[in-house]
Image (cartoon, rainbow, N blue to C red):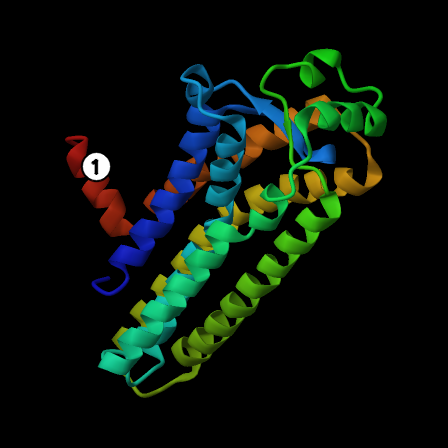
């Protein structure tokens, strides 16, 4: 566990902080069909500009990608590579980390640099969704990113960039953990058990996000806006950290033991 503690903690903190931000600090009311909405959370009450809230919230969601990528890169580096602790390898990994997080932090920059005037955005919103309640459109913190095609291109390229890395690192690590014979049987069993556990830890909450995300993406192109389904999708998405925490405690004995110790059990 020594080499994997930090990337696992970082990944879990990103998962949890995203939920805290969405459910407390921002508390968004989303209209995914037109990439719009408004916020009613703590940041709104203290006067933080809505575009800053939106940028932070969406960027925190995109940080899932580098967190998961760097976790599997960690497993690949210390299990598969023979030069894992060399100076050149550490430098290359630092550059790799920087590139991933830099892209995640700036993936929506083109969209936010081309924001429509929000008074015009309200007219566009009503034109695209005539059924949209006026209390949403006329809300003082109503905000629309606009240009759905640009948003789709940016997020699509980012998704390809992240998934290409994840598939590469997972494939290489799986091949080593489940096929290599150059280690003791006990060590191999421990590595396989741990790798299965982290795959379950990541996969289950990921599915929790992907189902509502696919629905929300589809509404952008069908113009089928249903407020009830949208609200449920936001609730499900922001429960991601809860599921990730429960799964972590169920499948990782060290975390479970430490948590019970803190609780005095």
Q: Quadrant of residue 36?
A: top right
Q: Check disc 1 and report its element: helix, strand or loop.
A: helix
Residue at the image position 45 percent from the left and 74 percent from the top: 174
Above or below 165: residue 80: below
Q: Residue at label 1?
A: 260
Whole-percent x, y for residue 255 in the image: 26, 47
Query: Which quarter of the rendering shows the N terminus?
Result: bottom left
Q: Nearer the viewer, residue 156 or 206?
A: 156
Residue at the image position 32 percent from the left and 68 percent from the top: 94
Above or below 212: residue 177: below
Q: Nearer the viewer, residue 35 or 208?
A: 35
Above or below 64: residue 99: below
Left or right for 214, reference 124: left
Q: Nearer the viewer, residue 151 or 260?
A: 151
Whole-percent x, y for residue 194 in the image: 34, 62
Q: Is residue 47 visible?
A: yes
Whole-percent x, y for residue 83 in the image: 28, 84
Residue at the image position 79 percent from the left and 24 percent from the top: 123
């Amino acid at each position: 566990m020594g080499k994997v503690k930090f990337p696992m903690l970082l990944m879990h903190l990103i998962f949890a902080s995203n939920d805290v931000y969405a459910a407390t600090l921002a508390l968004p009311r989303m209209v995914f069909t037109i990439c719009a909405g408004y916020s009613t959370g703590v940041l709104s009450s203290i006067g933080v500009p809505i575009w800053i809230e939106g940028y932070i919230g969406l960027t925190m969601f995109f940080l899932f990608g580098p967190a998961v990528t760097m976790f599997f890169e960690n497993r690949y580096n210390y299990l598969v590579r023979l030069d894992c602790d060399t100076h050149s390898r550490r430098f290359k990994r630092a550059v790799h980390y920087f590139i991933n997080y830099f892209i995640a932090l700036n993936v929506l920059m083109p969209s936010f640099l081309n924001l429509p005037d929000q008074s015009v955005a309200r007219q566009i919103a009503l034109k695209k969704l005539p059924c949209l309640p006026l209390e949403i459109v006329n809300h003082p913190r109503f905000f629309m990113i606009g240009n759905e095609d640009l948003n789709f291109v940016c997020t699509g390229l980012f998704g390809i960039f992240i998934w290409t890395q994840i598939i590469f690192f997972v494939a290489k690590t799986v091949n080593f953990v489940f096929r290599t014979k150059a280690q003791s049987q006990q060590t191999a069993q421990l590595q396989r058990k741990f790798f299965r556990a982290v795959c379950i830890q990541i996969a289950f909450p990921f599915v929790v996000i992907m189902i509502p995300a696919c629905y929300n993406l589809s509404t952008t192109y069908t113009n089928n806006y249903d407020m009830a389904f949208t609200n449920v999708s936001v609730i499900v998405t922001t429960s991601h950290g809860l599921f990730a925490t429960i799964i972590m405690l169920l499948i990782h004995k060290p975390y479970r033991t430490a948590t019970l110790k803190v609780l005095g059990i």
